[in-house]
Image (cartoon, rainbow, N blue to C red):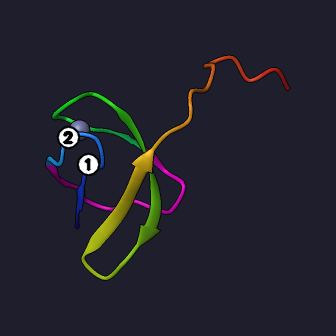
């Protein structure tokens, strides 16, 4: 599967990803969220800034 980075337009290849999974663009290093998985491509959006520390 592949997806296009919305930040730098790099074409990214993925093995197997699921919706809501966070990936990192190899082109610009931006954290991206898999918004939608289609047959052979994934829709990516920029991940919101999140702290590594989950309080709960
Ligand atoms: Zn990128």
Assign a secondary structure to mark 1. loop
Viewer-proximal residue among 8 and 50: 8
Q: Identify the residue shown where x is 27% and y is 71%.
A: 41
State the separation of the CA atoms marked 1 and 2. Answer: 6 Å
Q: Quadrant of residue 17?
A: bottom left
Q: Identify the residue shown where x is 23% and y is 56%.
A: 4
> In the rendering, at what x and y percent does residue 32 appear?
40, 43
56 left or right of 23?
A: right
Task: Name the disc covering residue 48, or none.
Answer: none
Q: Under 8 Å from ligand 1: the CB of mark 1?
A: yes
Let me know if residue 5 is in the magenta part: no
Residue at numbered disc 2:
8
Categorize mark 2 by other alpha carbons within 10 Å: few (<14), some (14-19), many (20+).
Answer: few
Question: How many callouts does the rendering have?
Answer: 2
Q: Identify the residue shown where x is 14% and y is 47%.
A: 10
> In the rendering, at what x and y percent does residue 34 appear?
44, 56
Q: Which image quarter holds the N terminus?
A: bottom left
Q: Quadrant of residue 39?
A: bottom left
| Quadrant field for ligand 1 | top left
In contact (CB < 8 Å): disc 1 and disc 2 = yes
Q: Quadrant of residue 42?
A: bottom left
Task: Name the disc covering residue 5, or none.
Answer: 1
Categorize mark 1 by other alpha carbons within 10 Å: few (<14), some (14-19), many (20+).
Answer: many
The magenta-colored residue range is: 11-22
Chief secondary structure of the magenta portion:
loop
Q: Under 8 Å from ligand 1: the CB of mark 2?
A: yes
Q: Is 42 placed above or below 29 here?
A: below
């Amino acid at each position: 599967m592949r997806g296009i980075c919305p930040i730098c337009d790099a074409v990214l290849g993925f093995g197997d990803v699921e919706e809501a999974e966070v990936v990192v663009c190899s082109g610009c290093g931006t954290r991206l969220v898999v918004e939608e998985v289609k047959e052979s491509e994934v829709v990516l959006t920029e991940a919101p800034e999140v702290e590594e520390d989950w309080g709960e």
